[in-house]
Amino acid sequence: MSRQSIVSRIHASVFAKLMAIMVGMAVTIPVLVLSLFLSMVWPLRHSADALAFQIAHNRMLVILIVLLLIVVAVAHVLIRRMLRPLRWLQEGVAKLGEGHLDVVVPRRTRDELGALAEAFNHMVERVGEMVRSREQLLLDVSHELRSPLTRMKVALALCPQDEHQRRLSGNVAEMDAMVTELLELERLRQGRGLQLEQHDLVALLREMVAVFADRAPGVELAPGPDRCMLALDAEKIRGVLRNLLDNAVKYSLPDSQPVRVSLDESGAAISVTVRDDGPGIPEDALPSLFEPFFRVDRSRSKKTGGYGLGLSLCKRTMAAHGGTITVGEHEGRGTSFVLTFTK
């Protein structure tokens, strides 16, 4: 191995840099102590003036402490600067965990931390490509299904009206609804499909609560503001509320309390909470709850839900409005979803 290669590897090693700082501190501190001693105390070793010797000794201690603090401070700054890529990587991992697939960690060094940052950026790029490929596949399949579904609906409309025809029509309608939701997911992801106008969010809540009020165990609106004007797509937000309330009443238990809807204003943030008194959601299902086609019931029985697109569509709709949907935390049974809007 050539000398140039060895030097390059040493420069590209975090361990070598840390060792250099430690060795530098180990050499600098004794040199400072010896230099101060030889320059201030040693010349007075045979002096009869004890006071001058004591003053020189005290000055040396003060100067030594100051110099030591300076050395430690410089070493601290150097180490923090050297380990800054770790903070960047930690921030990148946190953003990736939140779903930001466009995160890029800067690479400013050629050492192991720089290589780690490059590997992380490559991983994020590959994950983004896989997610985009999956979404594009769903979009392409959805588009391709539209034509045969339309032909099937026309053919069924011409068939004799009997039980067999009604079952087939119901199945085709379910497939058509699923395709429509998939296409809606894609439109919202691209920032299209919204018609924003000023609407009273409180009025929307009252409207949707009235729709579900007759379904057991009932739905009630908690006391709150009389009016809350926001720029939103009323029909899309109705869809979000309809999905949450439908799930809440569907999964209620025989002894469940009524579903409770509340609105809270805190500065520029407006939150709407839908809380039920059902069995709750398992802890291990929470990370995937808003993923397309995810179902808490792994059997995918039609008796326990649809096809797993509702909450994903809710999340995409809220993101298109610049808001969020999260699962609230509370003790006991039940589940609460929190919609957060920004004025």
Image: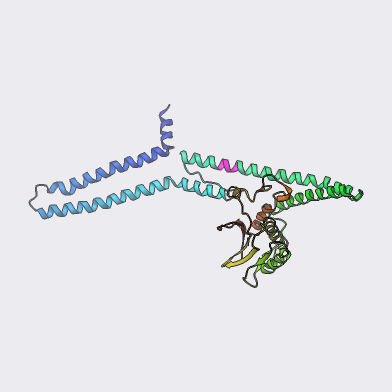
- Would residue 102 be found to the left or right of residue 15 on screen? right
Residue 110 in sight in this render: no
| Residue at horizontal 62 percent and vertical 71 percent from the top | 225
User: Which residue appears farthest toward the top when viewing the image?
Assistant: 1
Above-or-below relation of 206 to 105: below
Q: Residue furthest front?
A: 255
Q: Main secondary structure of the magenta part?
A: helix
**Looking at the image, is 84 positioned above or below residue 235?**
above
Relative side of 70 to 292, left or right: left
Along the viewing direction, whichever of 180 and 43 lies nearer the viewer: 180
Q: Say above or below: 195 vs 190.
A: below
Residue depicted at 53% across the width and 49% down the height: 94
Q: Magenta stretch containing residue 122, yes or no?
A: yes
On the rendered image, what quadrant is the N terminus found in?
top left
Give the magenta range: 121-125
- The colouring scheme, among rainbow, by chain, secondary structure or one colour, is rainbow
**Rendering coords of residue 284 (x, y %):** 58, 47
Q: Position of residue 208 (x, y in %)?
A: 71, 64
Answer above or below: position of 194 versus 203. Answer: above
Residue nearest the observer in this picture, 154 or 112: 154
Q: Viewer-proximal residue, 78 or 201?
A: 201
Quadrant where the C terminus sits is bottom right
Find residue 186 and report its horizontal and vertical position in percent. Answer: 71, 50
Q: Which residue is farthest bottom?
A: 226
Tell me how many marks there are: 0
**Magenta residue check for 148:** no
Spot occupied by residue 24 in the image (x, y as percentages of width and height): 32, 41
Residue 219: in sight, yes or no?
yes
Left or right: residue 83 compared with residue 243 = left
